[in-house]
Image (cartoon, helix red, strand yellow):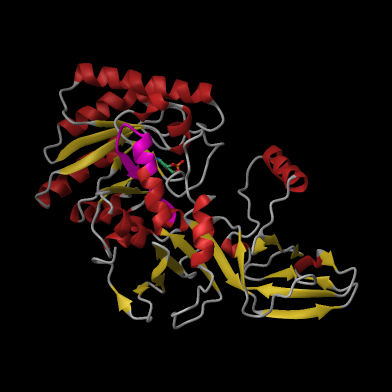
Amino acid sequence: MAGWTKTAQLAAQPEKGRPLAFSAWVEVNLSALEHNLRLLQKLSAVPILPILKGDAYGHGAPVVAAFLRSRGCSTIAVSTVEEALDILAWTKPQIMLLTPPLPDQLPAVVEHSLTPTITSPHLVGELNRLAEKGQRRLSVQVKVDTGFGRLGVAPQDFLSVVELIANASHLKLGGVFTHFSAAAWDRRFTRKQLQTFLALREQFQTHTQAPNVLWHAANSAAFLTLPQSHLDLVRLGTLLYGQAPLPLPPGYSLQETWRFRARIIHTRWLPPGHSVGYGRAYRTTRPTRIGVIPVGYGHGLDLEPQSSPWRQVRHAVAKVLCPRPTVLHGGEPLPILGRPGMGLCCLDLTQSRLDVGDVVTLHTRRTVVGRQVPRLYYLHGRLLCTFWNGQVLNLQGRTISLKGLF
Ligand SMILES: Cc1ncc(COP(=O)(O)O)c(C=O)c1O
């Protein structure tokens, strides 16, 4: 993708000026993130609510939140109270919680003026009591289950929950939303979900006087496939981070925002017939030079979601028929030998001159890469800061705040 051409240059000397040379790290291209945001804003008639759950899809939520805030996104959404508090330790956007808080978390919701999602009548009374005690009027959102089968008020219970909120002196209904379960694969079902949602909106409008209630439904896939679902705002994660849930239409020149890099920590020659790694899943057939990198399934390498047996089979067949190299150097694939371990795997370097300290690029699942792996943030082609060990570090390795950084 276009964004990578730039970051390939940025990362030509990723260690320059950095006091600690990391063995594995994630590069986040903030310019690409901004490019995607602006592009999606142009393609959308309604505001975008950026989704930062899952540590901003593996990009490091505090820095991404501060950056998006500096670019005009005053409200963001995460899943949990924990995720919200993690961000608020660094920057103070308005935060919507996409999942209902636990009863024990309600005091934190009120204290930090988070916008909780209501999925049942049970939290309303206690939330209102705490908001009154804290002398706040809290904006809440109601989630309706139109077919996902996970979280949300059943359509038939929707109006009674709305009424409960309307009667709560210190709560205000700020929005109503639903989530699509198959917008990338099943348009008929997605349209049905939307119809159910729109029918509720009609009922709502005839039964209540609540002003300024935002109705929202679209995620990235629905943003692309079902423009009627854009409604009052769109909740975007995947597209914002430069990924495509389905083939993109013309005009979607998204840029890649994330990439995983690691250094080779060890090389050695193995004779023919030597097994490599756990389970002895691979045996050399000739003298083989292996290179070890400190990356494994714990970093999302070769990790696929558990899903139906049919999807697993389809995935395995696709992998054989159209292999996508997992490890690359300068665009050239480097075969992985044997099974990746939790934090190590072996590459075949027989045909390569790569040595200890050299850098490779990996395709891994972004959301799996934990906070122990440093995030390096680039803006306008330059390394700006590193988020690691619970700290934001400048180029000299000193702890800095995010204020005014962007
Ligand atoms: C409720 C909700 N809305 C929106 C999104 C964003 O989805 P996407 O990454 O497909 O844009 C998510 C993410 O899973 C979500 O849980």
- What residue is rendered at 50% in x and 61% in y? 7
Ligand 1's image quarter is top left
Can residue 365 be seen in this snapshot? Answer: yes
In this view, 22 is above or below 135: below
Judge whether residue 88 is colored magenta: no
Q: In which quarter of the image is the C terminus?
A: bottom left
User: What's the magenta region?
Assistant: 39-54
94 left or right of 64? Answer: left
Left or right of 347, for residue 343? left
Q: Position of residue 335 (x, y in %)?
A: 74, 62
Farthest residue to the left: give it. Answer: 135
Q: Where is residue 173 in the image (x, y as percent from the top left)?
A: 21, 35
The answer to which of 156 and 20 lies nearer the viewer is 20
Asked whether 40 falls inside the magenta stretch, the response is: yes
Q: Which residue is drawn at 77% across and 80% down?
A: 268
Name the residue nearer the viewer: 155 or 399. 399
Q: In this view, does 171 lie to the left or right of 18?
A: left
Give the x, y percent position of residue 323: 73, 50
Q: Is residue 199 above or below residue 114?
A: above
Name which quarter of the figure residue 272 lies in: bottom right
Tell me, yes or no, if residue 99 can be seen here.
no
Q: Pinpoint residue 375: horizontal percent, then vertical percent.
A: 45, 67
Relative to 13, does residue 83 appear above or below in the rendering?
above
Q: In which quarter of the image is residue 28?
A: bottom left
Foreground residue among 145 and 273 = 273
